[in-house]
Image: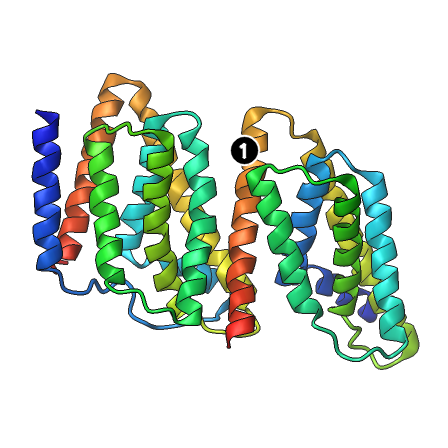
């Protein structure tokens, strides 16, 4: 069970997942939406986990995650503030897609559940960290740094998305 | 005097373009070796390196808001160029465009050119297409494609930051001279690539 938990935590920081979490965290943090966003993200992950538990067919969750990260990254880079409802939807969708894209590799039910919990804990922790940093970034150079990171994330996932779709 | 110098540089650039042979920084080799491979990828293309440093130098030279706008714009436009390369849209003279980017951007720094911000952004964005296209063509799909892409985007951004850091020396008279000299060196390097001398 502990190995499953650790494996789940590692799934949360896979490159695609990490970029998506950071992008949505920066977007939400710049909008000053802290706790509620975290709750939405966790609820989204729960929804995704339930979908996996109900033996849902394979989904294009990786592509969706990349697309969500690209959108969030572009918004952060361009410093475009989205309406709260849209940020909430993006956050929920990112959580759900992340859970769907991180199916537990364990065979036993207990280990599989531990793996999903591990993914959820690690992903939520990273999101909380990023939102906290983005919320507190008030100085001009900090805001510029966030926009640069958003630009880098968007550029990375756009390329990866194009690769996945084209080849 | 300055207009004459610019005209001379443009003539040199046009002549070098006419005599150009493909630069060898982009060899067509792909790679999905993860973040480190992606990070190393742009660092081993000297023509790419000098152009990226020139973007940072020029941004620092132009001051606010170009100092941060150009490094934000470049990766996004570069990614668009990368998509064109991945999809296989034919764009001619990519290597020539990359070398030309070093010449033009280096010359802008060397001559302390201060065009309107939109002109600088369009110029840098246009060259970003060439750089992105070359990288996109060499990207290969794989499990680490995201990490690879993130690696070379971050490496490119780091090169911009190096240029910006050095460019900040332009606040002092001696530093300004050093920055302009670096711009000249970058332009000459680009011309050497364009002429097949490197």
Q: Which residue is mark 1?
A: A144
Spot occupied by residue A22 in the image (x, y as percentages of width and height): 66, 49
Could you say which quadrant of the image residue B198 lies in? Answer: bottom left
x, y percent for residue A61: 71, 68
Tell me if mark 1 has few (under 14), some (14-19) or many (20+) residues whose alpha carbon lies within 10 angstroms of its own. Answer: some
Q: A17 or B62, which lies in front? A: B62
- At 87% across and 63% down in the image, what residue appears? A47
> Residue visible at 38% across and 69% down?
B89
Above or below residue A70? Residue B145 is below
Front residue of B14 and A1: B14
Examine the rendering and report whether any part of residue B176 can be seen. yes
Image coloring type: rainbow
* Horizontal relation, residue B103 to residue B132: left or right: left
Q: Quadrant of the N terminus of chain A?
A: bottom right
Residue B12: give x, y in percent of width and height: 8, 46
Q: Secondary structure at mark 1?
A: helix
Could you tell me residue B61's position as x and y percent?
A: 32, 28
In the image: residue A51, left or right of residue B162:
right
Q: Residue furthest top?
A: B173
For mark 1, name the chain.
A
Q: Is residue A153 left or right of residue B100?
A: right
Question: Quadrant of residue B47 in the image?
Answer: bottom left
Residue A2 seen by the camera: no
Who's the residue at 62% across and 38% down the image?
A80
Q: Is residue A163 above or below residue A43?
A: below
Please give the count of numbered marks on the rendered protein. Answer: 1
């Amino acid at each position: 069970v502990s190995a499953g938990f650790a494996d789940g935590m590692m799934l949360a920081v896979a490159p695609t997942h990490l970029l998506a979490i950071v992008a949505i965290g920066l977007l939400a943090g710049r909008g000053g939406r802290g706790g509620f966003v975290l709750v939405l993200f966790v609820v989204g992950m729960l929804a995704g986990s339930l979908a996996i538990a109900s033996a849902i067919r394979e989904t294009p969750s990786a592509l969706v995650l990349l697309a969500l990260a690209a959108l969030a990254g572009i918004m952060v880079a361009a410093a475009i503030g989205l309406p709260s409802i849209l940020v909430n939807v993006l956050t929920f969708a990112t959580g759900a897609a992340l859970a769907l894209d991180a199916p537990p590799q364990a065979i036993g039910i207990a280990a599989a559940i531990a793996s999903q919990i591990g993914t959820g804990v690690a992903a939520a922790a990273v999101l909380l960290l990023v939102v906290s940093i983005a919320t507190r970034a008030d100085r001009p150079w900090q805001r510029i740094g966030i926009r640069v990171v958003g630009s880098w994330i968007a550029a990375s996932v756009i390329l990866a998305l194009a690769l996945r779709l084209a080849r | 005097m300055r207009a004459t110098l610019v005209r001379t540089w443009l003539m040199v650039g046009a002549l070098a373009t006419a005599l150009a042979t493909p630069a060898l920084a982009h060899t067509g080799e792909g790679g999905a070796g993860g973040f480190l491979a992606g990070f190393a990828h742009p660092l081993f293309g000297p023509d790419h390196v000098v152009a990226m440093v020139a973007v940072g130098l020029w941004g620092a030279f132009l001051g606010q808001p170009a100092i941060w706008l150009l490094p934000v714009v470049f990766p996004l436009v570069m990614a668009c160029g990368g998509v064109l390369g991945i999809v296989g849209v034919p764009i001619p003279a990519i290597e020539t465009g990359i070398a030309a980017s070093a010449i033009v951007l280096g010359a802008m720094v060397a001559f302390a050119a201060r065009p309107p911000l939109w002109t600088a952004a369009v110029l840098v964005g246009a060259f970003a297409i060439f750089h992105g296209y070359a990288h996109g063509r060499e990207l290969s799909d794989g499990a680490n494609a995201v990490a690879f892409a993130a690696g070379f985007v971050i490496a490119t951004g780091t090169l911009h930051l190096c240029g910006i850091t050095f460019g900040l020396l332009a606040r002092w008279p001696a530093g300004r001279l050093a920055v302009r000299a670096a711009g000249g060196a970058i332009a000459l390097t680009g011309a050497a690539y364009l002429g097949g001398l490197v």
